[in-house]
Image (spheres, rainbow, N blue to C red):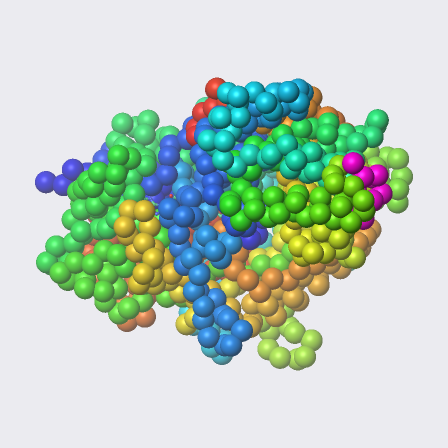
Amino acid sequence: MPEFDVCVIGSGAGGGPVAATVAAAGRSVVVIEKGRWLRREDFFKDELGRDRHDSYTPDLHLEPQVVEDRNGSGGWSARPTPEAGWDFWNGSLVGGASNLMSGFFHRLKPQDFRLLSEFGPVDGANVADWPISYDDLEPFYDRVERVVGVSGRAVQHGLADRRSSADFPYPPLVEHPLAQWFDRTCVERGLDPIPVPRAILPHPVDGRRGCEYTGICAGYGCSSGAKGSSRAALLSRAVATGNCEVRAESMAAGIVSDARGRAVAVEYFDRERRRRRVTAKVFVVACQAIETARLLLMSTGPAHPRGLANRHGLVGKNLLFSAAGFGIGHLPFEKFSTSEVEELRSPFPFLNRALQDWYSFAPENGSARMKGGTLDFLLLHPDPISRAIAQTSAKNGPLWGWPLKRRLVRHFREEQHVRFEVFADWMPHDDCHVTLDPDVRDHWGLPVARVRVGRHPRNKRVVEFLTERGAEVLRAMGAERIRTRPSAGPSTNLLAGTCRFGDDPRTSVLDRDCRAHDVENLYVTDGSFMPTGGSVPYTWTIYANSFRVADRIVERLD
Amino acid sequence: MTTELPKTASRGGWGYRLSRREFLVRIAAAGLVAGALARCGAARQDGWRMAELDEMGARLTTAEWETIAAAQDRLLPSAPDSPGARDVNAIGYLDGAMLFLIGSEARDLVRRGSVRLNELAEGRGVTRFSALAEATQAELLHELHDETDGDWTAVVLRHTLEALLGDPVYGVNTGQVGWTWLGIVGRYPRPPRAEQGRGG
Ligand SMILES: Cc1cc2nc3c(=O)[nH]c(=O)nc-3n(C[C@H](O)[C@H](O)[C@H](O)COP(=O)(O)OP(=O)(O)OC[C@H]3O[C@@H](n4cnc5c(N)ncnc54)[C@H](O)[C@@H]3O)c2cc1C
């Protein structure tokens, strides 16, 4: 007799909804999580702590990954992450990266579910429609608003979401006065400024405090509990039912399957590095796209010689990031009136505005309409050290001494800054994928993920277009010294793909309920299921889909 | 990386990482020792401390301490109305960082730069960089900068700015002078002191 009804591996945005739903339905669930269980009281606004001995992600020497990138001669070179200088870990703690997100929340648009049908094939890219539609997911977006806690304001605009509830359950956070400036600028230009929903509570709810407006969200755990992390919003409730056990500091090493191909147990290392096993009726993997693929590939069994759910060699394929770009503009106080400067100096950290006017666009060269994306506008992250270090680079070399001090005063005391980030579809293609590295192992002795990060040229083209639009808006707001950086590289904190869902087992790993085609009692509920990523950050969609799948799991247990 | 924040500096090959608790305990210990040394030159002769430091292996020597402190004064000079490196224990912090934060490559770089500054000083007729006039020191720093492709100044300047704007629990940003100068508010909850360190 299995010990638990459900075993969830990974406790982040993909794992939390399943644990909470199953526990609330009176079923037993165990959550296996490699990271530590930090509580609200353990989170500080400590930039040195975060930057220099990162508490939230593994030591890359103990738990490397391998990055495979294009080299100068057209081939691929592989470097372990300690050498590469970047990696794909985003948060190894109970609640995963959802603890550390900013919580800018966007729903996908109906067209994101039908990228192939709406825009046609793209050369060299594996674009596919989803097997479900926006309408299938809408009730769960709605559930996330209530259960995880999303604050915002529904407004009418060209691409307004179809909603089953009239407005958000929580009113928007207090905004910086620049939000009004932004709105005026956009309306004058015929654009539709959108208030950005945030997975942040504006006031206390169920033992979580309301937002305290430090603005130190991205990269930091939330000490008020306002941020809708899987830990604060879902796992705490799941545990309170008495039906959910969280086993922290437990590294899943493989899913054991029987001769018929069913999953029967998870093997993991506990905090004393003992190898242990837990059995369940149903298994749910949610380790974040790259580590999910790695775990499945490591989990060979008599019926799964190439790894679990990998009969057609599709696990790890079509890894998605978000195509990204950035821009910043400076608003020097000397250009503005006393009352305007007072507004610019407001201590409220949230601008919370986006534009989706170019969610699709017709390129000037007359070629067919193509998918565009979202521009999110925000103030700078308040961290002073990284901001100060950014001031040390100047056009003619490095800045130090008195000129640096002058620049620091200008930056921190004499101007405001508006930044934007671009989110666009990352084209899925054959050279962006996860495999197991043949040589490199982590300190458990397990093979590590080898991540090939090939880019499709379309990403850059779209990001460049959007970045230019963002710069125009900054200019119209009166910003000076506008700098933009369309990026061709992967955004390592937004991960999806690797276990596509679909109706055809020959082209997809999971079925439309995110159950493995090949393994009757195995589900994947992080962002891995997504065939295409949409042009927004993913987490609202990951949460919503995980709730959707959780309902299916509860139904099958009944 | 989108959604606001660049990846942490530690990903940039600066060295290995410690748990938060380990970091706090060690940097506090280093800060205390370093602070004591700074206050009292004689402390350098203190047999017990020197033995401890030798065992730890990586700390700044007297010559390095003096040289790099002088360089930091140029990188972030002190003025009556605005703090500089010497007001925020930047050298003590770098000394601690040599032990606990930066990898051996960066450590060697810091050391070599210090030796090189004194060599360059000899070319100007003195044996110690710290004995030179400020303007000459600045010139030599530019020379070193060019010779190391900017790496030396990047490492030392980075640590100097960390000392200016880091949380005072790390023995830097003394009395929050850095934050006060630049109007930085609202960093709460603050990290606890080492002995209370949690979650590490
Ligand atoms: C700084 C930052 C800012 C962000 N901002 C936003 C934002 O504004 N909006 C947005 O939508 N998204 C944002 N994100 C992204 C968001 O955090 C992720 O999309 C989301 O957390 C992904 O959920 P997940 O379940 O896939 O992974 P995670 O939340 O990372 O959870 C995966 C969990 O699995 C665990 N795990 C992995 N392997 C194993 C194993 N073998 N055994 C046991 N456990 C394992 C990990 O330790 C982790 O806890 C941000 C992320 C970061 C880092």
B135 part of magenta stretch? yes
State the image coordinates of residue B34 (x, y, percent, origin top left): 60, 26
Q: Which residue is drawn at 51% across and 64% down?
A: A426
Give the camera-side residue of A185 and B163.
Answer: B163
In the image, what residue occupies the spot 66% across and 80% down? A366
Whether residue A329 sits left or right of residue A61 in the image: it is right
Q: State the image quarter where residue A517 is shown.
A: bottom left
Q: Which residue shows up at 21% across the image and 45% down it?
A: A267
Q: In this view, does A474 lie to the left or right of A120?
A: right
Looking at the image, residue A15 lies above or below residue A435: above
In the rendered structure, the answer to whether residue B156 lies left or right of residue A80 reads right
The reply, left or right, for residue A426 in relation to residue A299 is right
On the question of residue A557 being in view, the answer is no
| Residue A21 spot, x, y in % from top left | 32, 39
Q: Can residue A448 be seen in this view?
A: yes
Give the dominant element type of the magenta stretch: helix, strand or loop.
helix
Residue placed at 60% from the left, 24% from the top?
B44
- Magenta residues span B131-140
